[in-house]
Image: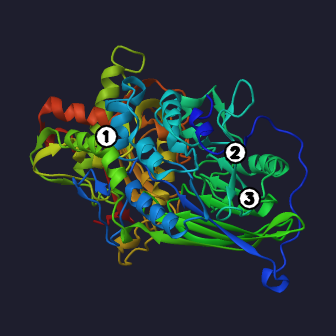
Amino acid sequence: MTSSSGASRRQVLAVAAAAASAPLIAGAPARAAAATGAKTWDLTILGTSDTHGNVYNWDYYKDAEYDDKDHNDVGVAKLAALVTQIRAERRGKATLVLDAGDTIQGTPLATYYAKQEPITETGETHPMAKAMNILRYDAVTLGNHEFNYGLPLLATWIEQLGFPALAANAVNAATGKPAFTPYVIKEVRLGGHGAPRIKVGILGLTNPGVAIWDKGNVEGRLVFPGMVETAAKWVPIMRERGADLVIISAHGGDSGTSSYGSELPNENPVALIAQQVPGIDAILFGHAHNAVEMRMVKNLDTGVEVLTTEPSKWGQRLSRMDFTLTREGGRWQVVSKKSALLNTNTVEPHKAVLAAVRGQHGKTVDYVNTVVAQSEVELSAVESRYKDTPILDFINHVQAEVVGKALAGTAYAGLPVLSIAAPFSRTAVFPQGDVRIRDVAGLYVFDNTLEAVVLTGAEVKAYLEYSAKYFTTFAVGAPIDLANINDKNVPDYNYDVISGVDYDIDISKPVGQRITRLVLAGTDTPVPADAQFVVAVNNYRRSGGGNFPGIVKTQVYNQQQEIRQLLIDWAQAKGVIRPADFYVPNWKLVREGVPVF
């Protein structure tokens, strides 16, 4: 796979061709311009990240304009309006726009043009390419979710962009060379006619977790070296090739921790990059969906403060980085730098972006409003994290049924089939009456596929113990605070419930000692450590997402069927969603054997 041919349509001075030995980096910090009387110039770099398929300010799951308790807005149309406003204010001055990844997955709009009408088959331009081309980005970094739909769709999207797509640490497994454009160097004029030019190097770093999360799409084809070591390799090369200013656009957070183990490089190493790699002026980052207005990180070698910023998620915020620059000794020096977050709820959406995507948005709205079944009663996910609910059992029932039927007549046909599901949404509801595709999609928001493996009873218990770390410890008799019932460091999607066995989670006990009852379904017989079970699980978890124990092993079932579509198909085939057909209460929270609820 190669970088977009559209890169040549933008003003690009250089792209990386191969690694070379490199000299080091520009020297001491600039003296204060005010003290020297030197003329200064300014440069603004705008940054977005984790737009996740949002163009319109629209909630496809609610079929309504997006809103939340803080009245945030979402979408590239809102971002484009802010960017256009800033460009107008800075007319005649240099302004660049970057994105730090996770662009083509996350909404029914994005899914529709990957699954229902794939751009690889229709030749249609992806809605995120249409929207971003109107906004006129200078570069986008590939996030881990760019790989969700396979390399052919990713390549097609990149070809549709009018600007480069960067990923220095996505490497061709066969050749060892970059599979995408590692960096670009943009030459921009710092003002009107006759103003000096500056060369801005932009390095893109994607997340090494792709090797786990999308193993089926990249194994044997791409490898993902660490973000820190990749930055250390390319930053000196960019400086050698003329970059006066170096900006990293990184799809990784700054916490220094990972959701997977030590088998892969760090998932969230932005602060480490700033500390350990000399020669970086600023880092735009994403992945964690946090709003980081400005965080300075001192480089341990040079003492230079590296500016870092993260613009939240879905287009809710725009990062604005402002640099004051001066020429000193024939070289550009940074006099000062700062960043701010701008709220997209302060502007009306960009009309040209809305118009470009209107047809695709409308088609998606029609699709997600298709009725698939009738529900006898309202089913809600609001309590699914801490209570056994019918709506989560609906997922587990369908998964177990599909796997069980597929394994009939095989060597695994005699084994009990368990199923694993996570409470992805706290707001999903199947209303009484019409259930639509958007209701099912709102329950199962990820594009996961169904797999199955064989686990022993001991492995099932270890898995449940790991999952139970989700809960905060509440001593016997202490009031239960639902707002703080879970550890805030464990996201909801990394808490799993299992159907097919009965168990208790004692939240008064320490992590690792919480599964106090684990018995065969409908009995009082403890699950034998050496018992064998087929376990239905999604591809994200089976490939190591969340770092759960025992689950990363050879599948006994993997037909590349999307779980969301299996749920839709089941509902359509039945016509009626009836809890009696699938709801089997099999787990509960307890304290010393006494149910919490």
CB-based contact (under 8 Å), mark 2 and mark 1: no
Give the mark nearest the N terminus, 2 or 3.
Answer: 2
* Colour mode of the rendering: rainbow
Label 2 – label 1 distance at C-alpha: 44 Å
- The numbered mark, 1 or 3, whose residue comes first in the sequence reads 3
Looking at the picture, how far across and down is residue 152, in whole percent?
Answer: 50, 27
Amino acid type, label 2 = Tyr
Q: Would you name the residue on which mark 2 appears?
A: 183
Q: Secondary structure at mark 1?
A: helix
Element type where label 2 sits in the image: strand
Disc 3, SS:
strand
Residue 68 percent across, percent down from the top left: 31, 67
- Give how far across and how far down residue 181 sits, in percent: 66, 38
Name the residue carrying label 1: 396
Mark in the foreground, 2 or 1: 2
Q: CB under 8 Å between callouts 1 and 3?
A: no
Mark 1: amino acid: Asn
Q: Amino acid at mark 3?
A: Ile
Which residue is labeled 3 in the image? Answer: 198
Which of the 4 image quarters holds residue 524? top left
Q: Which residue ends up furthest to the front in the rendered image?
A: 193
Instruction: State which quarter of the image contains the N terminus.
Output: top right
In the picture, measured across the screen, residue 546 lies left or right of residue 386, that is right
CB under 8 Å between callouts 2 and 3? Answer: no
Q: Residues within 10 Å of mark 1 (few under 14, many from 20)?
A: many
For marks 2 and 1 on the same chain, the one whose residue lies earlier in the sequence: 2
